[in-house]
Image: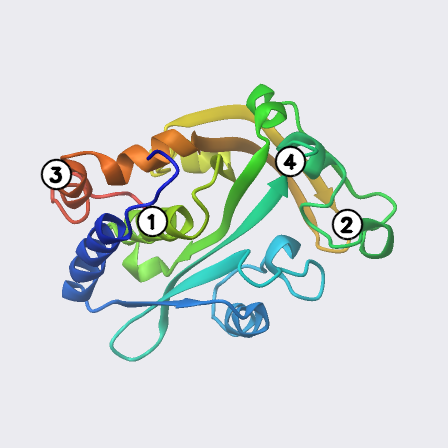
Amino acid sequence: MKGIVNPLRVSRCLQIHEDVAARKGIRFFIGFDFHEYNLITRTTPAKERTNPNFRSDRSRVEAGEGYWIIGVDKNNDVAGLEAARLYRLSHSNFAEHLESLKAFYADPTRHAHPQDRCICTAPTAKKMTGKVAYHGDLWVRRDLRGQGIRKIITRITHGVSFAMWAPDFLCALVARSTLDKGVDDMPHHEAGGAVLQLVDEDIVEDNWLSWLTGEELRSRFDGQDSTELLVVPSFSPAGLDPT
């Protein structure tokens, strides 16, 4: 039974987070058209440029292998965003996928600058094979930070990725400053996730690998006390996130 996703339990967990966000005046929607997502991100004030992983002009996301979440306030202004995609790595691993630049470009020989590079030394990245769900481009509007919105977005995307793909791993590349704030929702972190330089994108980063296994992801929704565990941190005054 381990390979079977319980959609009712996932749906209930997602509804809990949606209800908490609704009390703050935030509504969430899911989309699958990355042309639309790129238009939204380009026209959202203060939102940094979306990395090429999720840009349709650089990295095509096949149907059923990617989605995005948008939260809007009562004025329909963008409050938060995150995107996710599935990498099928049955004959490779996440470290190789990063270093080949195929994680960022559909065709690195065509899209990459000659000086583009990615070095991944995180040991676990070399063990990430099979279905790897990659989450990124997470953004929360400044005036809403510190109110648990980030945690709600990540828990919603974790639930959607589990329901859609039941991945072997779920991961992200995260700045050390984010980890220092204690707001990342993954249980495992390793340095050397991606020392990245993308010249045309004006990207120079040194990110950590943040991840959980498929079984750990499943336990968040299969556990007897999963709903209680999810509710407590959302907007508890004692547990608000700094971001």
The kind of residue on which mark 2 rests is Val
Indicate which disc, 4 or 3, sits on the residue closer to the N terminus: 4
Outermost residue, top direction?
A: 123
Label 2 to label 3: alpha-carbon separation: 43 Å
Identity of the residue drawn at 70% across and 34% down: 91
Left or right relative to 96: residue 129: left
Cβ atoms at labels 4 and 2 below 8 Å apart? no
Outermost residue, bottom direction?
A: 75
In the foreground, 191 or 146 = 191
Q: Is residue 174 visible?
A: no
The residue wearing badge 2 is 199
Q: Residues within 10 Å of mark 1 (few under 14, many from 20)?
A: many
The kind of residue on which mark 1 rests is Gly
Comparing marks 4 and 3, which lies closer to the viewer?
4
The kind of residue on which mark 4 rests is Ser
Indicate which disc, 1 or 4, sits on the residue closer to the N terminus: 4
The residue wearing badge 1 is 159
The residue wearing badge 3 is 238
Asked which quadrant contains residue 207, the reply is top right
In the figure, 194 relative to 36: above or below?
above
Residue 205 in percent (x, y) is at 63, 39
Indicate which disc, 4 or 2, sits on the residue closer to the N terminus: 4
The residue wearing badge 4 is 90
The kind of residue on which mark 3 rests is Ala
Left or right relative to 18: residue 85: right
Identity of the residue drawn at 55% across and 40% down: 131
Q: Which mark is residue 176?
A: none
Label 1 to label 4: alpha-carbon separation: 23 Å
Q: Secondary structure at mark 4?
A: loop
In the foreground, 15 or 203 = 15
